[in-house]
Image: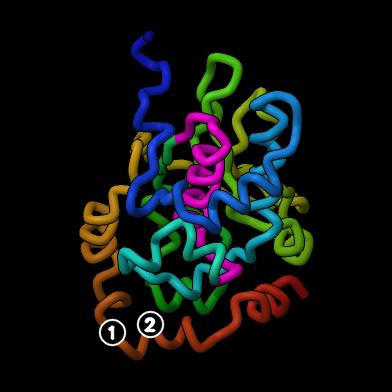
């Protein structure tokens, strides 16, 4: 085994990447279609990207809220739990996968989000790292296709042969995403560290019931619609 080859832990179920959950197993069996791991991984990527609405207004940092199977139950999620779901589905299909994280600037945002969080820096953005054809490939399933179309973003495609990461510009050529720090890859979701860093960076938002509810009581899709006009 080479230094970067998949460790057995990249196929194992964890409390957060619960690839052994009945719902995750059923999801993987339904969507992991194809004759190769690459084809099956691409099919899973599309199923997670477009089958679950991206919603950063409803962030639940509890252990239950960050679990892969919770995305299946809710029908939506933000970047980290959606990446956890893709990671879990790959593992359930026998494809080694792990979670990757980076800090990004100018994440898909709205005026309401920027006012609430007081920053355009989004730490611990999550994606999935998938072992295909002897290489680790980044797959970012966060933004569903309908959201991209409504917000004028280029959808992220994943072919299993190259990385799928955020585009630096949107369809109109406006600055969209800038990667400012790579946090690396993890065999399990490092929830304790994510929560600690969120409290340090977004303390006022996380601790204030009023500011948190201002997002949770609002509609991200409606805000996107307004700003896209």
Percent from the top left, x then y, of residue 209? 31, 88
Q: Which residue lies at the image location 31% right of the left edge and 64% below the top edge? A: 63
Answer with the quarter of the image where residue 163 lies.
top right
Residue 217 circle label: none
Looking at this view, is 211 or 216 the one in front? 216
Q: Which residue lies at the image location 76% right of the left edge and 63% below the top edge? A: 146
Q: Which residue is mark 2?
A: 212
Q: Which residue is mark 1?
A: 208
Percent from the top left, x then y, of residue 55? 56, 69
Residue 208 in view (yes/no): yes
Over which residues does the magenta segment extend? Answer: 74-97
Q: Pointers 2 and 1 in contact (CB under 8 A)?
A: yes
Percent from the top left, x then y, of residue 204? 26, 77
Could you tell me which quadrant the C terminus lies in?
Answer: bottom right
Could you tell me which quadrant the N terminus lies in?
Answer: top left
Looking at this view, is 104 or 144 the one in front? 144
Measured in 3D between alpha carbons, the distance from the residue under mark 2 to the one under mark 1, in whole angstroms, is 6 Å
Label 2 Cα crowd, 10 Å radius (few <14 / some 14-19 / many 20+):
some
Image height of 106 relative to 93, above or below: below
């Amino acid at each position: 085994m080479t230094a970067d080859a998949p460790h057995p832990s990249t196929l194992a179920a964890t409390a957060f990447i619960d690839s052994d959950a009945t719902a995750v197993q059923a999801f993987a069996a339904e969507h992991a279609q194809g004759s190769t791991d690459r084809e099956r991984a691409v099919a899973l990527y599309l199923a997670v990207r477009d089958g679950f609405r991206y919603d950063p207004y409803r962030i639940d940092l509890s252990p239950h809220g960050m679990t892969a199977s919770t995305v299946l139950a809710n029908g939506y999620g933000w970047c980290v739990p959606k990446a956890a779901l893709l990671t879990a589905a790959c593992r359930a299909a026998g494809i080694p996968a792990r979670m990757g994280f980076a800090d990004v600037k100018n994440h898909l945002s709205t005026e309401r989000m920027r006012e609430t969080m007081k920053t355009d820096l989004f730490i611990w953005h999550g994606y999935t790292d998938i072992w295909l054809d002897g290489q680790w490939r980044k797959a970012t399933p966060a933004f569903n296709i309908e959201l991209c179309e409504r917000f004028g973003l280029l959808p992220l495609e994943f072919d299993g042969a190259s990385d799928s990461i955020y585009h630096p510009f949107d369809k109109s050529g406006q600055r969209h995403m800038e990667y400012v720090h790579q946090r690396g890859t993890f065999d399990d979701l490092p929830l304790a560290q994510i929560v600690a860093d969120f409290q340090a960076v977004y303390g006022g938002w996380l601790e204030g019931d009023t500011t948190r509810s201002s997002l949770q009581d609002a509609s991200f899709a409606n805000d996107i619609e307004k700003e896209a006009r």
